[in-house]
């Protein structure tokens, strides 16, 4: 399966086979193009996808050593995401599928993240359904009950910012640069998390939802009240990271309760998305999982962040249980994974 990913600021293509081998995985990051603006600019992203995608697809096929006639289908992210980029990926995939006479699969980007851990699980320990997924990236912050391919129950979501977005905004407030997550983590390593007391958003709430905008406001206030020397910045970064970590752990704990009511004890906890790169967050989640008798699975970080191998794999999983999509599929800026949240008009 050839996979194509263009929903945010990575132009990516990959070839994956149904025995879970990643034959190629090409990611062209646009970070440099967006850095001057301190965040992803949708129009710049769409134009860059258009400029690079053909070359990225050719590289992916060449790296895999296969021609188009040898692939079983073309899967592209059909949403949710920045619509200009999604259109570029979907149109390209449809054109290739039509000219090569191959099936086309429109993949939900969230589903691709959700199924990645099945692609990367060790050969002797495949990841079976159901499992609980914490998806934490710049664009998404959700807790999902993954019951099967196409069968997802959203247990919690953010009511404002995603966790990665909160890291990016906090790093900007502290003048640490973009992308903010890694920069903030580096600063936090030199800081004292106890010097400043920041709120723990949503702690103890009965649902499993997230909220980070209040935390960001509290941080902004503190940056206004203190002189931002290097140590103060590090201490604020450490406090902020501790607050986010505590909130993610508390919300995940709540989701585990909800998940266990339906599926019983001892199913795996999977973490995906760019924020899973954060060492403190991984450690805290590992501790939580151990306490609850769950195995923690975190795909390799290059497959936690946006990539096309996950899209190709989701295409394989989808085709294994149902038909391909037709060429009249319309790219979707919003595409909630579960029917209940779709009906409630959820964003993604
Ligand atoms: O999954 P991803 O590459 O892109 C999407 O948003 O889909 O995630 C990027 C996000 C950014 O917000 C970035 O700041 C955050 O993940 N991130 C981190 C770390 N590395 C990346 N956040 C906290 N700590 C990190 N080490
Ligand atoms: Zn993503």
Image (cartoon, grey):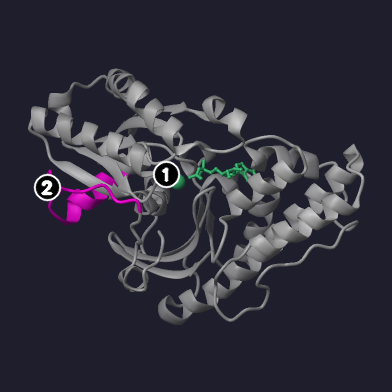
- The quadrant the C terminus occupies is bottom left
Q: Is residue 60 left or right of residue 189?
A: left
Q: Is residue 25 visible?
A: no
Q: Nearer the viewer, residue 172 or 17?
A: 172
Q: Nearer the viewer, residue 221 or 144?
A: 221
In the image, residue 23 sits, relative to residue 207, either above or below, namely above
The tag earlier along the polypeptide, 1 or 2, is 1
State the image coordinates of residue 257 (x, y, percent, origin top left): 54, 78
Q: Is residue 250 left or right of residue 98?
A: right
Q: In which quarter of the view is residue 38 placed?
A: top right
In front: label 1 or label 2: 2
Q: Which residue is painted at 33% across and 57% down in the image? A: 335
Q: Which residue is painted at 32% across and 41% down in the image? A: 86
Q: The residue tagged with tag 2: helix, strand or loop?
A: loop
In the image, residue 186 sits, relative to residue 252, either above or below, namely above
Q: Which residue is mark 1?
A: 120
Q: Which residue is painted at 29% across and 34% down in the image? A: 88
State the image coordinates of residue 334 (x, y, percent, origin top left): 35, 56
Q: Which residue is mark 2?
A: 326
Q: Nearer the viewer, residue 176 or 104?
A: 176
State the image coordinates of residue 272 (x, y, percent, origin top left): 50, 50
Q: Which residue is painted at 49% across and 78% down in the image? A: 258
Badge number at residue 286 = none
Question: Under 8 Å from ligand 2: the CB of mark 2?
Answer: no
Q: The residue tagged with tag 1: helix, strand or loop?
A: helix
Residue 135 is inside the magenta segment = no
Residues packed near mark 1 inside 10 Å, few (<14), some (14 to 19) or many (20 plus): some
Residue 316 is inside the magenta segment = yes
In the image, residue 274 sits, relative to residue 149, either above or below, namely above
User: Mark 1 and mark 2: span between their CA atoms?
Assistant: 29 Å
Which span is picked out in magenta? 313-333
State the image coordinates of residue 187 (x, y, percent, origin top left): 79, 40
């Amino acid at each position: 399966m050839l996979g194509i990913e263009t929903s945010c600021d990575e132009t990516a293509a990959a070839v994956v086979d149904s025995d879970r081998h990643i034959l190629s995985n090409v990611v062209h990051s646009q970070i440099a193009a967006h850095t001057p603006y301190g965040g992803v600019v949708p129009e710049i992203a769409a134009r860059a996808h258009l400029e690079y995608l053909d070359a990225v697809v050719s590289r992916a096929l060449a790296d895999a050593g296969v021609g188009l006639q040898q692939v079983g289908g073309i899967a592209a992210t059909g949403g949710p995401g920045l619509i200009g980029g999604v259109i570029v990926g979907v149109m390209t995939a449809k054109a290739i599928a039509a000219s090569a006479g191959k099936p086309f699969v429109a993949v939900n980007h969230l589903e691709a993240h959700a199924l990645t851990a099945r692609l990367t699980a060790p050969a002797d320990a495949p990841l079976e359904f159901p499992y609980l997924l914490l998806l934490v990236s710049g664009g998404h912050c959700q807790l999902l009950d993954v019951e099967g391919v196409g069968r997802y129950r959203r247990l919690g979501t953010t009511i404002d910012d995603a966790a990665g977005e909160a890291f990016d905004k906090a790093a900007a407030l502290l003048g640490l640069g973009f992308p903010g997550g890694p920069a903030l983590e580096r600063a936090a390593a030199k800081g004292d998390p106890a010097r400043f007391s920041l709120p723990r958003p949503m702690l103890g709430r009965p649902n499993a939802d997230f909220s980070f905008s209040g935390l960001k406001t509290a941080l902004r206030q503190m940056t206004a009240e203190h002189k931002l020397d290097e140590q103060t910045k590090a201490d604020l970064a450490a406090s902020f990271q501790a607050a986010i970590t505590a909130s993610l752990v508390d919300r995940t704990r709540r989701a585990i309760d909800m998940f266990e009511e339906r599926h019983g004890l001892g199913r795996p906890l999977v973490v995906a998305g760019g924020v899973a790169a954060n060492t403190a967050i991984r450690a805290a989640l590992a501790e939580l999982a151990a306490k609850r008798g769950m195995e923690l699975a975190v795909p390799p970080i290059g497959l936690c962040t946006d990539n096309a191998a996950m899209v190709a794999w989701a295409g394989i999983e989808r085709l294994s249980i149902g038909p391909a999509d037709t060429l009249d599929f319309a790219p979707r800026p919003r595409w909630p994974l579960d029917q209940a949240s779709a009906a409630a008009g959820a964003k993604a």
